[in-house]
Amino acid sequence: LFIPTKKRVMMTTNFIKPVLRMGEPLLFGRSEEVNNVKEASVVQIIQEMIATMRATNGVGIAAPQIGYPLRIIAMGFDFAPRYPTEKP
């Protein structure tokens, strides 16, 4: 599923999740495949990932980093303070 960076995701506090750090057991496990990215629960996870990534000034995030053992990644930015010279 491709969500262009121009499409905004609501950044409510319930969408922003804590990011797991290196050493967390969930990050060592094998994540499950996702077959239907249009399923409501998967769309919710993707929205949480994007909101969390933006709130932490990231340019990419994986679902396991916010506690979901699923094979989903999100990447992209309009502006990233961590990489001020990079273009979107």
Image: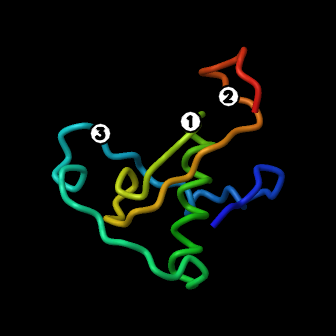
Rendered location of residue 51, percent (x, y): 61, 53
Given residues 72 and 49, the one toward you in this image is: 72
Residue 80 is marked as 2
Callout 1 secondary element: loop
With respect to residue 80, does 44 lie above or below? below
Q: Are marks 2 and 1 in contact (CB under 8 Å)?
A: yes
- Whichever of callouts 2 and 1 sits on the residue coming sooner in the sequence is 1
Residue picked out by circle 3: 21
Whole-angstrom CA distance, mark 3 to mark 1, is: 14 Å
Percent position of residue 45, x then y: 51, 68
Which residue appears farthest toward the right when viewing the image? 6
Give the crowd class for mark 2: few <14, some 14-19, many >=20 residues within 10 Å. some
Q: Which residue is mark 1?
A: 58
Which element is circle 2 on? Answer: loop
Which is nearer the N-term, disc 3 or disc 1? 3
Looking at the rendered structure, the secondary structure element under dot 3 is: loop
In the rendered view of the protein, which quadrant contains the N terminus?
Answer: bottom right
Question: CA separation, marks 2 and 1?
Answer: 7 Å
Q: Quadrant of the C terminus?
A: top right
Q: Residue at 42%, 58% (x, y): give it.
A: 63
User: Label 1 amino acid?
Assistant: Gly
| Most distant residue in the top direction | 85
Q: CA distance from mark 2 to mark 3?
A: 20 Å
Which amino acid is tagged 2?
Answer: Ala
Left or right? Give the position of 21 relative to 80: left
